[in-house]
Amino acid sequence: MSDTHSGVFYITTPIYYVNDRPHIGHGYCTILADVLARFHRLFGQETYFLTGTDEHGQKVQEAAVKRGMSSQAHVDDMHRHFRDLWPTLHVSNDDFIRTTEPRHVRVVQHALQLLWDRGLIYRGEYEGFYSPRVEKFFAADELVDGKCPETGGEVHQIKESNYFFRMSQYRDALVAHIHAHPDFIRPESRRNEVLGFLKQPLQDLCISRPKARLEWGIPLPFDPDYVTYVWFDALLNYCTAAGLYLDDERFAHLWCGVHHLIGKDILTTHSVYWTTMLMALELPLPRHIIAHGWWLVDRTKMSKSLGNVVDPLAMKDKYGVDSLRYFLMREMVVGLDADFTEEAFLKRHNFDLANDLGNLANRLAKFVQRSMGGVVPAPGEGSGTPHDDDLRAMATGLPARVRELVEDLRIEAAVEAVMNLVRRINRYVAETEPFKVIKTDPAHAAGAVYHALEGLRFALNLLAPIMPGKCSELLAAIGAPPPVTSLDALRWGDLPAGAAVTLQDAPFPRHEVPTFQAADPGAAPAPARKPGKAGAAAREAGPSGAPGPADATPAPMGVAQAGVASGDPSAAPAKVTYDHFAALDLRVGTVLAAEAVAKSDKLLRLDVDLGEARPRQVVAGIAKAYAPADLVGRQFLFVANLEPRKVFGLLSEAMVLAGHDDDGLAAFSPLRPLPAGAKAS
Ligand code: MSP
């Protein structure tokens, strides 16, 4: 995001549906946006941070009906669970938008009227299947086993007259924009997913619902019998808050720096629906669309009998908001999935915060209070060792490094870089031994303590966007000025000698880590998962789980299996000509990244180098045989010219070849490494 160096940084979160209460996924996305906003403020950029609630649509109407309330009363009640949560998580949003607010209704109706007047909306017949869970329509051939391809949930067949937005005509312009702006959609794997999606013809978008079927929405300005499709309404929130059609100057000012932070499941709506809507409205596209991964809670590892069922937001009340924010930012690589377990959370808390950071602050403070009159000592000549320069160089070089990492969305790496400074200060204290020499060489001891405290002040200032509450408290408690408001103001030597060091209690008390897996070693996360039972992978895809000839049952998604003969020669595949075989593009691919697919215990998502300009995304049913970490760097055989296919909402662009026997799957690998993309024949 090198273009964020100047100008406004306008960051948005998705607006959350008010059909349910907030969970850790909402918390993560909003805290990540907050962390980015706080960092960009520190970088000296004008920052505007928006979040809010998505209050129309079928899901919300159904939730209201279930509660026996009017939709309005329901949303008025439910939106508070979000709005009131954010301050408790130290989220510093500048605005909170509700799509039922008059300011937003006005913008949506104005935009619709514009598109209608320009002939970019037309009336037509719609026939398809509606998935209320994702509020999206699907064609019959997009369904998987008659269910929603994205969630596996129920769909309703619908045939009705509706209004359509001419989305199809913007496909080429959108593809060109994505090519011209390589970091428009981040991370790269998501950009490739969108480009893959755009290889198929783009349909026009149905943007209305007849009031007879759905009342809860913004009425179309040109036909009062219809309300607006919830996504068309919701996406415009980003413009409403910036002042579209109300304050042109403000809108233009903010809009040139807009960044949308979203979860990977709402990539298409943002990268395709939203961008084409903006094109039609003749508005600039956002700077970046940043898609993060999902927090998974491995259900097999949670059970009441083990006592480890975790309500992630309850963590905040139990362990503190700062620890929660630290864990979420340190543990997840933006763009990839991560597992939320209380065990991992407590380990991070204990190792990083209680041990490395908390102990350091506590030991220094206690020493100052005991032996230095309770005030920051004068730096003097320092400790008189070369370690002073080393520590100072590391601390003063860190703001620029952190900025670089944050701008590259490597938040976990930025946190780690600061924690490395904290660890360096701990080593510095061991090297200079102020506690030992206080009697014999008080000047040396004072200099060393000053350096250590000053290093700590740097670390706390750089961690402040992650843990604003604790870092402010700790800075005050070690006699430092309040957190700087600009990184340029973070200068070595600004810790005032003579300031009172008041820290009393350990800032991050340690927590006992329960032995979650002790009672059930089988549930422990194994580096390589146990292969599935006899033919399991093949049978799972078969009807009612009945075992049958391997080649008669469909293969799991993204994997072609060379089946062991079933013993039934009549089930053997028909002979093919050499030409048929030669038509297959079989190639060696190197796995660059691998991760679990949410809500599926069979699928892994792989980024695979097939020797092309960009890696391909492959969704493969091999999760029972391999842990993601074991695949990275390995080579396998792929069918590279299968029609791309959407699996669990992810585009799979090739198929990995695997054999199977009673122990499960084994993917085919070359006996020696080959260049990625090497042809197999
Ligand atoms: N209302 C739409 C967004 C409209 S934006 C114009 C919506 N709302 S949502 O409440 O269902 O989800 C909001 C966000 O929460 C999505 O970005 C989604 O990715 C995120 N998460 C939901 N579950 C999640 C996890 N388990 N982990 C991380 N984030 C996930 O979609």
Image (spheres, grey):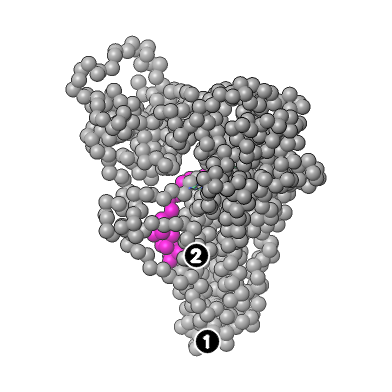
Whether residue 278 is situated above or below residue 392 in the rendered picture:
above
Q: Which residue is mark 2?
A: 317
Residue flagged by tag 2: what amino acid is it?
Asp
In the visual, does 167 lie left or right of 62?
A: right
317 and 531: which is toward the camera: 317
Residue at screen point 20% across, 17% down: 569
Decide whether residue 350 is among the magenta residues: yes
Q: Can residue 292 be seen?
A: no
Residue at x-position 71% and y-position 25%: 120
Does dot 2 land on a helix, a strand or a loop? helix
* Residue 373 inside the magenta-drawn segment: no
Q: CA distance from mark 2 to mark 1?
A: 36 Å
Query: Between 157 and 92, which is closer to the camera in this rendering?
Result: 157
Q: Quadrant of residue 497?
A: bottom right
Q: Nearer the viewer, mark 2 or mark 1?
A: 2
> What is the quadrant of the C terminus in the image?
top left
Question: Which residue is nearer to you in this view: 369 or 30?
Answer: 30
Q: Earlier in the sequence, mark 2 or mark 1?
A: 2
Circle 2: is it few (<14), some (14-19), or many (20+) Cα within 10 Å? few
Tell which residue pokes out farthest to the front in this image. 68
Residue at 53% across / 48% down in the picture?
67
The residue under label 1 is 371
Left or right: 514 in relation to 470: left
Could you tell me if the residues under marks 2 and 1 are in contact, i.e. CB atoms within 8 Å?
no
Quarter containing the N terminus: top right
Which stretch appears magenta?
335-351
